[in-house]
Image (cartoon, coloured by chain):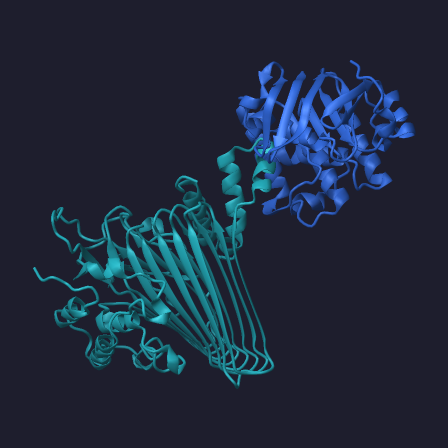
Amino acid sequence: MTVVSGRSTAPYLDLYARRGGEPEVLRARRQEAIERFEAAGFPTARDEEWRQTNLGSLLRAAPAAASRRPLQGGEAARFLYPDCPRMVFINGRYAPEVSSPPRQVTAVALAELGAGGDTEPVLEHLGAHASGRASCSADAGVHPFAALNTGLFEDGAAIVIPDGAVVEQPLQVLWLNAPAARAAESGDETPAVEVSFPRLLVIAGENSQASVIETFAAVDPKAGGYFVCPVSEFVCGTGSVLHHTRLQADATDAFHLGFQHAQLERSASFDSSSLAFGGGLVRNDTVGSLDGEGSHCTLDGLYVVAGSQFVDNHMRVEHRQPHTTSHQLYKGVLDGRARSVFNGRIYVHQAAQKTDAKQTNRNLLLSKSALANSNPQLEIFADDVRCTHGSTIGRLDEEALFYLRSRGIEREQAHAMLVYAFARELVEKASHEPLRQDLENRLLASLNGGGPR
Amino acid sequence: MLRVSDLHAKVEEQEILKGVDLEVNAGEVHAVMGPNGSGKSTLAQVLAGREEYDVTAGSLELDGDDLQEMAPEERAHAGLFLAFQYPVEIPGVGNSYFLKAALNAIRKARGEEELDAMDFLQLLRKRAELVDVDEALLRRPVNEGFSGGEKKRNEILQMAVLEPRLAVLDETDSGLDIDALKTVAAGVNALRSEDRAFVVITHYQRLLNYIVPDHVHVLLDGRIVRSGGSELALELEEKGYTGLTNGSSGG
């Protein structure tokens, strides 16, 4: 058994060396990505962008390729919305038997890329934006986990929405994890984690309109630790309107380090909601790149965490052209010893006059040991802009709690009502009714299941 | 119904109530009057079970049950209601949703069947009419952005829906213009009955023109210094609180 040193990339390079292969058309960019990952290495506490994210527990674990297993009947059903076309993945691999890809659009499993059909748009964009090269500002550097994903993803989904198409039903992409049960490895100091690398590329054609729902979940929420390292890229063509919901309901001892990137052409609109309930060590890096004049992005989020969960949202919005607008609203509910980081950077380039950027982060602490960090960062190089930001960290209003109780409402219910009231706008934003209902149920369940207060 | 004996209470180490005695029977309306700082609101909050207020001596009983043993919600289940002097704004919680949750929590605690949405809505509409509350207020978040008068009316609406046995009104008249005052009083009067009692806490005699009390008590410096019939309120109006300090305390 090899002893793994703290920050070594070796076990991940080993995964690369032993990978199962890939479509010919992806080989070169995969090689390039893994080289970039190797050169960058894992971030340390000295890295400004990572100093509040302790990766120790992840890097002490020995990574293993996610096991291959078929989906058993009904395992996916409780995560699926009945009327939505869907692509289902288990441990990072496509499960066609439970998938029903949408008809109106081109949906390709990435492992099949090059096996027929038009691969041009996919090849043009895959990895071009999320690599830390093409679209991010020079100082953004390489995102090591995005590079790792590009080097190691086994499969994924590419969805191409044709120009002018209006897709009524949301498309659901379900990323399920089910690590193989392991016998207790007593005395083993490097616990093993199965790693999967979900990969999504959505290309919204000119003046198209669509909604995509991504769901990250565990078949068995108690099935032990695993590491999910997803990358999602959104390319929003001129005048397109793309809605995105990201529901993260992984097992509470899972590692989840994700990267998502939206690139917007002229007058495009990207509206994303990220709702995080699961995971033990969670980090999401989100980049909105407003590359076209008059484009708009909304990046909203909610995190509801308890116990020893850690969730870190690193946001970066790039205003590159005039008349671009961005809205961010992130809310957090923290109980137990949970900790959160919200790091919101808005970068207004010199050309981006008439930028309108708004960022809000609100946190509700339900216990004395919970801790929220909020760091807004504005970098403005244009002179005619409007940028506002605000962050709050507060506790439950005791006056309101007493008021509700004085009317006969039990303490626990009054508590849940107030927390729900705090978070509801992010749940009720969902326009697809089954999704909204699911989010509401998850929010209520997480409130009732909360630890001691 | 309510028996308060030698009640002492303090807030943040400061003694506010210094031995209050008060007995209220079913069907009665009691007015508790007193200047600012006399302990009126403390009495109201202690009755409702506010945890920041420490009862250091004495007893509080509702129908023979020790209120001090009961959480705020249990007091509500037992039929106690406090109309707040400063109703709390609760963004994100709908007014009618809140009232339904409250009514059903009380019904459940009493072993009664909970009301479904339709039955509740019917009841709510009737009560809103009784206390002249605009239906638009029912759809808004609890007290959020309500005017002073709307907040007070909303308290009376809650009382009308929850039908308490003992209602404590803490300066419900403060900040009301005369029309709102009449509306609030009419709502209270409509709910007066033989098996229900009211404790009306007020600074001014004005409200008592519209809600005529059976008993009036004067609270000064944490003690009830005089009690009498409704004529005592008029005497107070004439002499002011300072004119009473030489008066004797009575029954």
Q: In this rendering, is residue B187 above or below A430? A: above
Rendered blue, the chain in question is: B
Q: Is residue B115 visible in this depiction of the protein?
A: no
Rendered cyan, the chain in question is: A
Percent position (x, y) of residue B62? 63, 18
Which quarter of the image is occupied by the C terminus of chain A?
A: top left
Looking at this view, is A133 or A203 the one in front? A133
Please give left or right for residue A323 compared with residue A447 in the image: right
Looking at this view, is B180 or A365 the one in front? A365
Q: How many marks?
A: 0
Please give left or right for residue A38 compared with residue B128 in the image: left
Q: Residue at x 60, y 21 (%)?
A: B57
Percent position (x, y) of residue B115? 58, 30
Q: Is residue B29 visible in this depiction of the protein?
A: yes
Q: Residue at x 30, y 71 (%)?
A: A146
Which quarter of the image is occupied by the N terminus of chain A?
A: bottom left
